[in-house]
Image: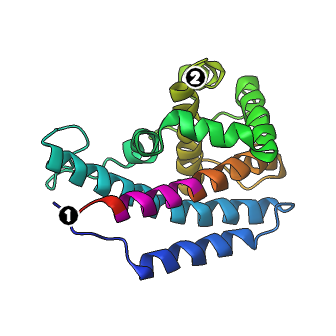
Amino acid sequence: MYPHPLTAQFEEFYRRWLTKAQQYDAAEPEELFDKFFSLYVVYNALYTKTATYLHNKAVREGTEEYQLDPNGSFPDRQAATRYVCQLLKSSSLMQSLESSSETSRALKELKAIVAEQHFRICLNPVTGEWEQERDLQLVSMLESNSKDENARAILQVIYQIRCNMFHGRKDIQPIQQKILVPLIIIFEKVIKKLFLKIEQVYQEFSW
């Protein structure tokens, strides 16, 4: 099993980057990009902790699912989406998002924006070409009656936009504010909920 990695330094890292993200002005597209980047630094660290916890839990329980291959690559996309849903539980995540008026409004905005397909979210990682079928799948998942599909779609949108921005597929333009503003509201809620859950499970787990 991997060692217990939740330390006071990690908690300070979390709070420092979250504070940094909150200092950016949402009215400026450049600062929205910077805000999203800063939030993703936090999220990246949190879903790595999520993967570590699920790995150790799987080893202890003798199950193969969620065990990490020390000789393989880290399952980044899966950790950022499926693993986080597994830890938070999709129904709990959606309840948190839908019970707050701010995040509920942001969620409705995000669903409408994705459905319009004005923003080409899923791009081919090599060519950068729009993969419309994947976008349509996101629309279907966001509109589904399944809370699991809803939650996974939200996290997939976050991850895909991260890929587009980090790899230079999207330029900093004012039009990007339309999707980034509601997405960041949702993203902050996900991050805070995930941090609290990680604190809980790491305290309860016998390392």
- Residue 157 image-quadrant placement: top right
Instruction: Please indicate whether residue 10 sits to the left or right of residue 143 in the image.
Output: left
Give the labeled residue for mark 2.
141
Using a 10 Å C-alpha cutoff, classify the residue at mark 1 as few (fewer than 14 neighbours), some (14 to 19) or many (20 or more).
few
Which stretch is magenta?
193-203
Q: Please state if 13 lies on the left or on the right of 171 as rendered.
A: left
Of the image marks 1 and 2, the number of the one nearer the N terminus = 1
Residue that carries the numbered disc 1 in the rendered image: 2
How far from the left and from the top, in percent, is residue 192?
Answer: 59, 59
State the residue in front, 100 or 164.
100
Q: Residue at x 16, y 38 (%)?
A: 63
Residue at image position (57%, 47%) is: 164
Q: Does the segment drawn in magenta span residue 45? A: no
Cβ–Cβ below 8 Å for labels 1 and 2?
no
Residue 6, given in percent of the width and then of the height, sits at 36, 71
Instruction: Name the residue at the right extreme.
Output: 27
Q: Secondary structure at mark 1?
A: loop
